């Protein structure tokens, strides 16, 4: 009863509070009030939320930045029959994407065809792209030429972390993971700009650039960088209205990602455990984005003859479904995978403590040697809870474990 709002100003204030909460919540929260629960039950669950009057029992909220929030719940508290008002409890739980904070991505998209045909010497974008096609290929094939790995090696040496270069027909991307907070865009721009200038100067009878080439690269970091990698795997760098899950040319980007991954990971290459986990997820994401079982909306494009406008609209709807069901969950999986890698040293430390405890028990009581397997099993079982807490990002002391 205390939650029922009588004053209009209080009603407006609570409505604004709820709006501010929902604008930072998930991208599509469909809050359905189906079960009536008492405030005492909610207090027993330990939930904390904003409460507000709403005119109906179903609310749909759309918001950008969906990857930062995961769970939302709506529960019906009570209905004031006099005012026909439904009270809704909304709980939004923020996700921890901090493990992705050291991930960086820089990219150069293919310039428009008109600029490529004009080929002005003062256009650094065109100059870099011509160097890229001459040395890395035009993206028609999936094999790497060795230039990609050499560039990744130089980026790795400059950043002190991991690096990988992806060259497709539509873009040139460089991904990096490093503890050092260095400007990846400046490092890559200086490297490929100098390489393009040197390449042009080595061509016989070719016009020379008046100044060294200085390209402008798009830069992303953290979860945005991971999302960009998955967008390339899903949509091949195209607009959403151009996405065609049945087009083999667009699906070719998955083979190019695999070729770049294999080239950078072989023989102790510049691609380490972090980027390996990211690229494996990208391969899974690219395949799932074209699978009708993973995204049922893809089947709506199968066997239909549509005009240009209707086809573009249908493709946008399918792309939105792919983004919701495949791409955004992949970002969360990447954060979980990186969190597990961050927790690896602590997990090994706790496992070693368990092994030492079993060995000490055997030394103190030689008769316990016959029960070594049982003791080891019991120690592992007792350690399961703390290990899961460490994987979730919690701090666990050795005494607690």
Image (spheres, rainbow, N blue to C red):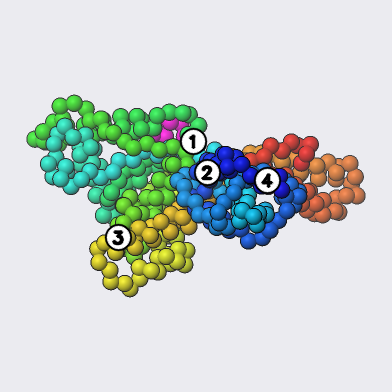
Residue pointed to by mark 4: 3
Q: Residues within 10 Å of mark 2 (few under 14, many from 20)?
A: some
Q: Residues within 10 Å of mark 4 (few under 14, many from 20)?
A: few
Magenta segment, which residues? 155-162
Q: Residue at x 76, y 41 (%)?
A: 401
Q: Is residue 117 visible?
A: yes
Residue 249 placement (x, y as % from top left): 29, 60
Residue pointed to by mark 3: 312
Going from N to C along the chain, the mark reached first, 3 or 2, is 2
Give the alpha-carbon distance from disc 4 to disc 3, as whole Å: 48 Å
Going from N to C along the chain, the mark reached first, 4 or 2, is 4
Give the alpha-carbon distance from disc 3 to disc 2, as whole Å: 33 Å
Disc 3 is placed on an element classified as: helix
Going from N to C along the chain, the mark reached first, 1 or 3, is 1
Q: Is residue 96 left or right of residue 65?
A: right
Residue 19 — which label? 2
Residue 102 — which label? 1
- Closest to the camera, between mark 4 and mark 2, is 4
Residue 55 placement (x, y as % from top left): 55, 54
Q: Residue at x 52, y 48 (%)?
A: 26
**266 or 388, nearer to the observer:** 388
Q: Is residue 294 above or below residue 238?
A: below
Give the alpha-carbon distance from disc 1 to disc 3, as whole Å: 36 Å
**6 or 394, nearer to the observer:** 6
């Amino acid at each position: 009863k205390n939650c029922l709002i009588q004053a209009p100003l209080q009603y407006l204030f609570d409505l604004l509070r709820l709006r501010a909460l929902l604008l930072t919540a998930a991208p599509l929260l469909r809050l359905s009030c189906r079960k009536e629960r008492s405030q005492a039950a909610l207090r027993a669950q330990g939930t904390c939320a904003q409460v507000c009057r709403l005119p109906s029992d179903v609310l749909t909220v759309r918001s950008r930045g969906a990857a930062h929030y995961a769970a939302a719940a709506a529960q019906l508290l009570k209905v004031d029959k006099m005012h026909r008002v439904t009270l809704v409890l909304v709980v939004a739980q923020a996700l921890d994407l901090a493990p992705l904070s050291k991930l960086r991505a820089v990219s150069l998209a293919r310039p428009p065809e008109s600029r490529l045909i004009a080929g002005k010497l003062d256009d650094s974008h065109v100059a870099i792209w011509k160097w890229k096609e001459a040395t890395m290929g035009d993206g028609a094939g999936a094999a790497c030429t060795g230039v990609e790995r050499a560039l990744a090696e130089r980026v790795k040496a400059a950043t002190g972390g991991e690096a990988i270069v992806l060259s497709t027909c539509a873009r040139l991307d460089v991904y990096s993971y490093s503890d050092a907070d260095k400007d990846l865009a400046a490092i890559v721009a200086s490297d490929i700009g100098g390489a393009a200038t040197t390449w042009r100067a080595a061509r016989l009878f070719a016009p020379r650039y008046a100044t060294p080439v200085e390209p402008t690269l798009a830069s992303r970091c953290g979860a945005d960088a991971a999302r960009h990698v998955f967008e390339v795997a899903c949509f091949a760098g195209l607009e959403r209205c151009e996405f065609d899950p049945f087009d083999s040319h667009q699906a070719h980007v998955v083979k190019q990602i695999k070729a770049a991954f294999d080239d950078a990971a072989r023989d102790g290459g510049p691609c380490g455990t972090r980027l390996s986990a990211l690229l494996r997820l990208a391969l899974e994401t690219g395949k799932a984005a074209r699978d009708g079982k993973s995204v049922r909306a893809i089947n709506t494009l199968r066997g239909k003859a549509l005009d240009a406008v209707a086809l573009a609209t249908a493709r946008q709807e399918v792309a939105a479904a792919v983004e919701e069901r495949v791409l955004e969950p992949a970002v969360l999986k990447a954060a979980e995978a990186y969190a597990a890698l961050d927790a690896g040293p602590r997990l090994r430390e706790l496992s070693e403590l368990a092994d030492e405890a079993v060995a000490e028990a055997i030394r103190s009581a030689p008769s316990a040697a016959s029960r070594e397997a049982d003791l080891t099993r019991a120690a592992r079982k007792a350690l399961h809870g703390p290990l899961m807490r460490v994987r979730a990002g919690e701090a666990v002391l050795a005494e607690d474990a």
